Amino acid sequence: MSPTTFSRRNNSVLGSWWWTVDRWTLGALLVMIGLGVLLSFAASPPVAERLNLGTFFFVKRHIIMVIPAILAMIGISLLTPKQIRRLAVFVYLLGIMLLILTLLSGAEIKGARRWLMVGGISLQASEFIKPAFTVLVAWMLAEKYRDPQFPGVLMSILLLGLVISLLLLQPDLGMTLIILTTWISQLFIAGIPLLWMGLLGGAGVVGLGGAYFFLPHVTRRIDQFLDPNSGDPRHDLYQVHKSLEAFQNGGFFGKGPGEGIIKKNVPDAHADFVFAVAGEEFGLILCLILVCLFAFIAVRSLSRVMQDSSLFILMATAGIAIQFGLQAFVNMASALHLIPTKGMTMPFISYGGSSLLALGISMGILLALTRRRHGSMEIL
């Protein structure tokens, strides 16, 4: 590779990308992906052996999905905001079709129909629709700001209503809350009246109350969270209790790689409770590193666009950063029993199959929107 390959005078697509992309965020994402592979080696072999799938079955599948995720992230980060909007339209429409197909022929697991088997891979369509929905809402609200006659808020409500209706039919309350939170955050950034925000907040409280009274699995999880004695500790709260024991056993420095016990007893140690594996084997140090990485990526992305003149870029970036951070928070808080348990993967760290590819798309959009032109502060 010649010294001028990434010279500032290099006007090629790759050269321009290298000098305009946020290399700090890119580096943090690559470190996070590497830690995900490390924890896959630590957490998944005992789970695979219990299922008679071969010791490194989940490790291999994790690495196989990491490769296209990185390629998607880099490839999408080369796009312009206009191309990002076009991509979002395509992914949103495809995601809606996949959500409908999931309801019709998806696999039912624990009373929920959220996964679709495609070529031997479990696909969760809602993971792909999240970033596309966020970009489209940002587009609609930005057009409303540019042209007050444009029905941007109404169109965002229609986009939201279609997605939420399909998610509640699965049902998937956790994903519904993340998408709702993102939408409300974007409306707040767009400057809607505080009265509207109050009404939306009230509607959210009513919706949560309705979920508690009419969705049995939501009722059970909230009751168990508020009163741990209300459930059977050998079944209902087994994974949570083992997770808390893992953090206690790990202490500050951890028990050491391969020395953890939780992964031998918890079915979801490689997925929803991988944070507990990190705490037990690598201690508080690695847990804090993970928290700092998630916080750094979210805050760094927001700081890159906070003063930008494009409302679309600001709202789209903020929405994706909020989604990313909120998903990580839900996973960590569930493992620590700070909130009712919710089956949600930790971005890039948990084994999640197609969710890695969806995260690659989401972070590619984030990197594309936070790029800067060489020699100026103008966003591409």
Image (cartoon, rainbow, N blue to C red):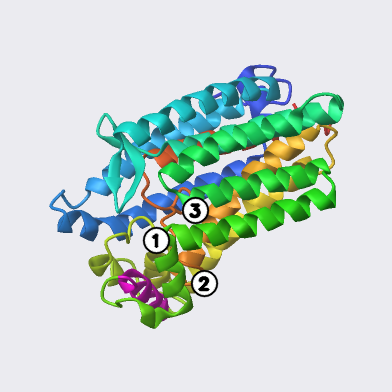
**Dot 2 and dot 1 residues touching (CB under 8 Å):** no
The residue that mark 3 highlights is 174
**Residue 345 visible, this angle:** yes
Q: Where is residue 379 in the image (x, y as percent from the top left)?
A: 77, 30
Residue behind mark 1: 216
Q: Looking at the picture, does residue 63 appear above or below residue 142?
A: below
Q: Does 31 sit above or below residue 367?
A: below
Instruction: Answer few, some or many: residues within 10 Å of disc 2's Cα (few below 14, many 20 plus, some between 14 and 19).
Output: few
Q: Distance between the residues labelled 3 and 2?
A: 15 Å
| Position of 181 relative to 290 (above/below) | above
Tell me which label, 2 or 1, sits earlier in the chain. 1
- Give the number of the mark in front: 2 or 1: 1
**Mark sitting on residue 338:** 2
Range of residues picked out in magenta: 236-250
> Total label count?
3
Task: Say if the magenta span includes residue 45.
Answer: no
Marks 2 and 1, Cα distance to the nearest angstrom? 21 Å
